[in-house]
Image (cartoon, rainbow, N blue to C red):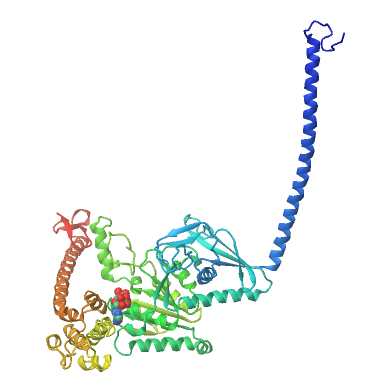
Amino acid sequence: MSFDPHNPFGDGTANPLTQWLTSFMGLSSIFAAVGMLSSAFLGSSIRMLILGSIVETGRRLFQWVTARMRFQYSITAQFNEGDPAYEWIVLFLTQENVWRRSQEFTVTATNSRRKWSVKTWLDPKVEGNAEYVPTYQAPQLFRWKGHWVEIKRSKEGDTRMNPFALHSTVATIYLTIYTLDLKLLSALVEDARARYVEVNRPNVVIHLADSPQYGPALIWTNVKHKVRRPLSSVILQDGVVDALVHDAKEFLATEDWYVEAGIPHRRGYLLYGPPGTGKTSTIYALAGALNLEIYSLSLASNFVDDSFLQRAASSIPRQALFLIEDIDCAFASREDEEEEYLRMLGAGRAGPPDFDSFPSKGKFKGAGGGGEAVRSQVTLSGLLNVIDGVGSEEGKLFFATTNYIDRLDLALLRPGRIDMKVQYELSTRQQAHDLFLRFFPESRFPDFAAASSSPSSTAESSVGKDDKNTESVDSIHASDALEKPGPSQEKPTLFELAATFAAAIPPGEFSTAELQGYLQSHKTSPVGAAKGAAAWLQDIRDERRKREERELARKRRLQVLREGWDAAKTGKGKEMGRDVTAPIPSRIAVDGEMQTHK
Ligand SMILES: Nc1ncnc2c1ncn2[C@@H]1O[C@H](COP(=O)(O)OP(=O)(O)OP(=O)(O)O)[C@@H](O)[C@H]1O
């Protein structure tokens, strides 16, 4: 008989003790197994832990060593957006194709000439309509002249400079060269600058301060590239452009003389005259000829105040051209002051005026509706400080333009601030003639065979020179040129057509821009342009007469308003200081229309 230890009673049923023992022994074996397992797991965990610690320590050690190495064997430079050097380095990196492995892009359709977008289209001859600008956040490594260079770009909210402008951003490029030789950094920067100059050789670079940015590096962020315009394309009276170029060149070449004489190396030019006569065009062409970049701002912008102007001027690099357009905005005329105050009255935003105590400048800026005289927040002393300060850095040409020289304070016009004044006038016949020939060159219109004489000699012979009021066109009359063919040709020559056109344009009545606008509308037909000039002239005169009538009516209404308030001031008026005997306009609209209430 065998003894079954699990069934000592032999009845085939396990007693509770046995069951308990059995289950206890089962559990304990499970525990034992688990224990064995867990001790194995613990052991391997500890091993893993130790291994991990060693790896982590090694990693940190490696980082520490590389950081020390990097610190000791590398040079890092920072380039901030808004600084000219930032543009150089951007172009350099694009040419080096550093960002080719980028995987994140900002796609933009703005016509930025900043060529650091990546070519994503297959056909290299096809220019895409959008720019694919990598976000550039990941560091990129590349070789330059046998050295490793690392580049990283950040773009963060620039709360350092302006805690209130949450959306203001400034991009920074960090460039690290793995070398001990500091000269390599300057060599790289010079390389970048030389490439920038080369790429922009056909262009004039214009930096605009046209948004209310904060911080010195953020002012000139809008950069435009205009195709360089030859000086000869600006048609002025003889000698004007040459005199300007000569003066500016001499100034730039004589820095030593200025230093020795203790005179600030600066030169100020004022170009003044009616709109559309070529002031800005002259400056752009001049900057191109002298290889200078333009830094241009308008005092009319509502965010330009003394402090902005100061920061803008002081962040212009040396050897640059600083341009202030419409400088008269800082000098409001008394007429404008009165007019604007009257607008405020019309809108019910002011009490009775005291015309005798008008402030000297733009106190009422922005108070009226749209269309009020543009007035600057810049003060005269702020402006003079900046112009004087321009001389504290070498080689700056300062240019200002205005349509109203009489509004400018004499303090601004004194030599030392404005050294050369150039007057622009409405087009002479000679200018009209030359403009015509520029629009219709022989190369584009070979059918109109040219006369053998040179353009200038022909122009001079057919149109009286310099005497804009007595110019005669004896040699050719409009109908002559158009109806009688030339001696040996079927068609009139371009010079004959130019003379016909010039003969139809009364001197001193149209700006060159107006003539250009007219010629553009006939750009494929020199005969049409010459023929249609007289009719166009009549249309423009009619239009101007109507405009003058509207302006006169507007001035009359303002005069009535003023007289009403004057009467109220001297005690004739009744309640609320208003002279109720005269109708007082409640609102004067921009176009001169007004509603009155009685
Ligand atoms: N003398 C000129 N020669 C050639 N083009 C001219 C001349 N004057 C004006 N233009 C043309 O007219 C347009 C406006 O010219 P520009 O801006 O230089 O005039 P402006 O005198 O500066 O005017 P504003 O006083 O309104 O600023 C340009 O397209 C320019 O090419």
Q: Is residue 475 above or below residue 12?
A: below
Residue in view at x 18 percent, y 68 percent: 551
The quarter of the image holding the C terminus is bottom left
Q: Position of residue 563 (x, y in %)?
A: 18, 64
Judged from this view, the residue extending furthest toward the front is: 1
- Residue 72 in sight: yes
Residue in view at x 56 percent, y 64 percent: 173
In the shown orientation, is residue 354 left or right of residue 191? left
Q: Position of residue 152 (x, y in %)?
A: 58, 62
Q: Position of residue 432 (x, y in %)?
A: 23, 84
- Residue 579 in sight: no
Q: Nearer the viewer, residue 203 or 589?
A: 203
- The image quarter containing residue 527 is bottom left
Which quarter holds ligand 1? bottom left
- The image quarter containing residue 74 is bottom right
Count of numbered labels shown in the rendering? 0
Residue in view at x 78 percent, y 7 percent: 12
The quarter of the image holding the N terminus is top right
In the shown orientation, is residue 168 left or right of residue 550? right
- The image quarter containing residue 591 is bottom left
Q: Position of residue 594 (x, y in %)?
A: 18, 59
Q: Nearer the viewer, residue 484 or 598?
A: 484
Q: Nearer the viewer, residue 148 or 36?
A: 36
Q: Nearer the viewer, residue 597 or 470?
A: 470
